[in-house]
Amino acid sequence: MTPVLPFRLKARGTDEVAAWHVRSLSYRLHGLARLEPRTLILQWSGTAEVSEVKGTAVREYEERIPVREVMLPVAQVASLTLHGRWWRPRVVLRVTDLTILGAVPGSDQGVVTLWIAGRDWPLAVELITGLEIEQADAALAAAEGPPPLPPQPSA
């Protein structure tokens, strides 16, 4: 059975300032990482906490963020590593294509940090091991494929 790793994402909030109007957003994001054949899947959702000041009126509320998903082919995962065993445990995901993580909040230059609970460390180890096996299987399948055809002579 494939492990499902719960994680949190840290995304920067935004502040918008205009004449007589200030809007501030902060995010609480959580998600799941799981491994399917040849694919690492990241799903996340959460809330945006909004504070607005219009003139003299102040309003605070939450907006739900719908579930989003990114499917990463294992061949495009450069590394998936564990850090901070006892202090701030996290999994750092690096990819080979900068565009593939573009939709993931908190990602920067092909890297995203998945913050995990200390109790989920064994799940993270199992997920990383499974990913390495999937990557080895994909590389082996690519190596065993038919050889490329020779170039055709030009007439």
Image (cartoon, helix red, strand yellow):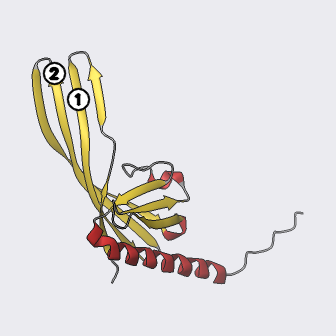
Residue shown at 59% from the left, 81% from the top: 141
Q: Position of residue 66 (x, y in %)?
A: 24, 52
Quarter of the figure with residue 5: bottom left
Q: Which residue is mark 1?
A: 23
Residue lying at the far front of the rendered structure: 86
Disc 2 crowd rating (10 Å Cα; few below 14, some 14-19, many 20+) is: few
Measuring from the top left, give residue 144's x and y in whole percent: 65, 84
Which quadrant would the C terminus be assigned to in this image? bottom right
* Kind of element beneath mark 1: strand
Q: Nearer the viewer, residue 133 or 143?
A: 133
For the point 52% across and 52% down, the residue is 98
Instruction: Report if the CB atoms under discs 1 and 2 are less than 8 Å apart.
Output: no
Q: Label 1 sits on what residue type?
A: Arg
* Element marked by disc 2: strand
Quadrant, the N terminus: bottom left
Q: Is residue 104 left or right of residue 145?
A: left
For the residue marked with disc 2, what is the amino acid? Lys
Count neighbours of disc 1 (C-alpha within 10 A) and say few if under 14, some if 14 to 19, many if 20 or more: some
Q: Position of residue 128 (x, y in %)?
A: 43, 74
Using the rendered image of the protein, determine whether residue 19 is visible from the camera's viewpoint.
Answer: yes
Query: Which quadrant of the view contains residue 136?
Result: bottom right
Q: Residue at position x 76%, y 75% from top?
A: 149
The tag on residue 54 is 2
Left or right for 75, reference 5: right
Farthest right residue in view: 155
State which tag comes first along the sequence, 1 or 2. Answer: 1
120 up-or-down from 43: above or below: below
- Left or right of 103 on screen, residue 8: left
Measure the C-alpha gap from mark 1 to mark 2: 9 Å
